[in-house]
Image (cartoon, rainbow, N blue to C red):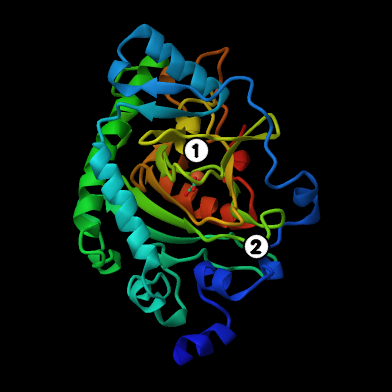
């Protein structure tokens, strides 16, 4: 007790600790005035809800049309009948909750900063802080590589709760199948070879699981759980807390709440897909608002390509009337630019537009 009280008098290492220690978020977390004026939590009313797509029926024209409409309007959709057993989803969410509920010292065993200094992409902690004016998010995360499978770094995978590793292994074996199903369905919608996008994925392609933990926040009107961003890879499969909302998606400059049903996934396109489909379907900008009373959890599985893969619009989508809208770039260079821009709250993909 004394030791942990002492530690709290120093700069808290995680938002979870901070939330337990302060009544007012430190200024590093407070969004600039212009963001706050627009209202951080308020969302616009949707004309129509985000479509719920039945993944077991995607071969039917009407379900495929629903997917097309969702991607055109939002760049994301809700998915049901995705083939991930509900019990497995529940086990994954409980293992994640148990992980974050453990004492700081236990979670630190998976830390992303070794001896308080060098920052690693994998592990438990927060974003790297590179500049003084970087505004921080009200969340802690556990970020783990899941693909390629032979490059998993188990030193960063929690050993407690005991079920964590097996459950994550099972869960991501299912999400990978969902990834391929969606990529094939999108290729069909675009009248490309069904395997066009799947063929961009080599056995060195990346996959990361990001477990997000958002503690209750005393000032939801001043602070964001996660700043506006788009995801960097091909596609993201998001499993969010069904009890506590917070995810919002932007469209034409307005923010809308993404409401989920139990055991549905939120699937969104990410920047590499926007480039490959030449901007026909966009990678949506989204953010997470905080909640004054309740903690919130989510699990994002991000699928990308291999570092050497050149991102470029699919040749089958280009002709004299449809020139490429994005410059070519290797995925590894894209990732570097992405992280730099993410920290500053800007989008790297904008710099690739022709
Ligand atoms: O927590 C959420 O609902 C969204 C998380 C997210 O956007 C991300 O991890 O990239
Ligand atoms: Fe995201």
Measured as percent of width and height from the top left, residue 245 is found at 53, 43
Q: Quadrant of residue 172?
A: top left
x 45%, y 75%: residue: 118
In the picture, which quadrant includes the N terminus?
bottom left
Q: Is residue 183 above or below residue 19?
A: above
In the picture, which quadrant includes the C terminus?
top right
Measured as percent of width and height from the top left, residue 116 is found at 46, 80
Measured as percent of width and height from the top left, residue 179 is found at 32, 33
Relative to 75, is 210 on the left or the right? Answer: left
Numbered badge on residue 218: 2
Work out whether residue 27 or residue 348 is closer to the camera in this orientation and state it. Answer: 27
Work out whether residue 261 or residue 145 is closer to the camera in this orientation and state it. Answer: 261
Secondary structure, mark 2, is loop
Work out whether residue 215 or residue 238 is closer to the camera in this orientation and state it. Answer: 215
Residue tagged 1: 271
Q: Residues within 10 Å of mark 2 (few under 14, many from 20)?
A: some
Name of the residue lying farthest toward the front: 293
Does residue 346 appear in this view? yes
Does residue 172 appear in this view? no
Mark toward the start of the polypeptide (2 vs 1)? 2
């Amino acid at each position: 007790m004394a030791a942990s009280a002492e530690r709290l008098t120093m700069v808290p290492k995680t938002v979870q600790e901070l939330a337990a220690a302060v009544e007012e978020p430190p200024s590093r977390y407070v969004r600039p005035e212009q963001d706050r004026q627009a209202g951080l939590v308020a969302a616009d009313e949707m004309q129509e809800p985000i479509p719920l797509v039945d993944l077991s029926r995607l071969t039917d024209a009407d379900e495929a049309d629903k997917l097309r409409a969702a991607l055109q309007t939002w760049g994301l959709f809700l998915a049901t009948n995705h083939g991930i057993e509900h019990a497995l989803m529940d086990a994954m969410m409980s293992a994640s909750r148990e992980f974050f509920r453990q004492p700081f010292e236990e979670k630190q065993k998976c830390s992303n900063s070794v001896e308080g200094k060098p920052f690693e992409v994998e592990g438990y902690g927060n974003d790297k802080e590179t500049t003084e004016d970087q505004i921080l998010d009200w969340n802690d995360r556990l970020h783990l590589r899941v693909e390629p499978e032979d490059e998993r770094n188990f030193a960063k995978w929690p050993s407690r709760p005991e079920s964590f590793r097996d459950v994550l292994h099972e869960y991501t074996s299912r999400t990978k199948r969902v990834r391929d199903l969606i990529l094939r369905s999108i290729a069909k919608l675009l009248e490309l070879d069904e395997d066009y996008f799947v063929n961009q994925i080599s056995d060195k392609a990346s996959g990361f699981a990001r477990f997000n933990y958002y503690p209750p926040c005393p000032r939801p009107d001043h602070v964001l759980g996660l700043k506006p961003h788009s995801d960097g890879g091909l596609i993201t499969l998001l499993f969010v807390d069904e009890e506590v909302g917070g995810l919002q998606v932007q469209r034409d400059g307005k923010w809308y709440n993404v409401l989920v049903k139990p055991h549905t996934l939120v699937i969104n396109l990410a920047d590499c897909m926007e480039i490959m489909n030449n901007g026909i379907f966009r990678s949506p900008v989204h953010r997470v608002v905080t909640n004054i009373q309740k903690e919130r959890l989510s699990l994002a599985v991000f699928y990308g390509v291999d570092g050497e893969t050149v991102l470029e619009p699919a040749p089958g989508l280009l002709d004299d009337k449809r020139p490429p809208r994005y410059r070519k770039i290797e995925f590894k260079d894209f990732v570097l630019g992405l992280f730099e821009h993410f920290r500053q709250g800007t989008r790297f993909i904008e710099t690739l537009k022709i």
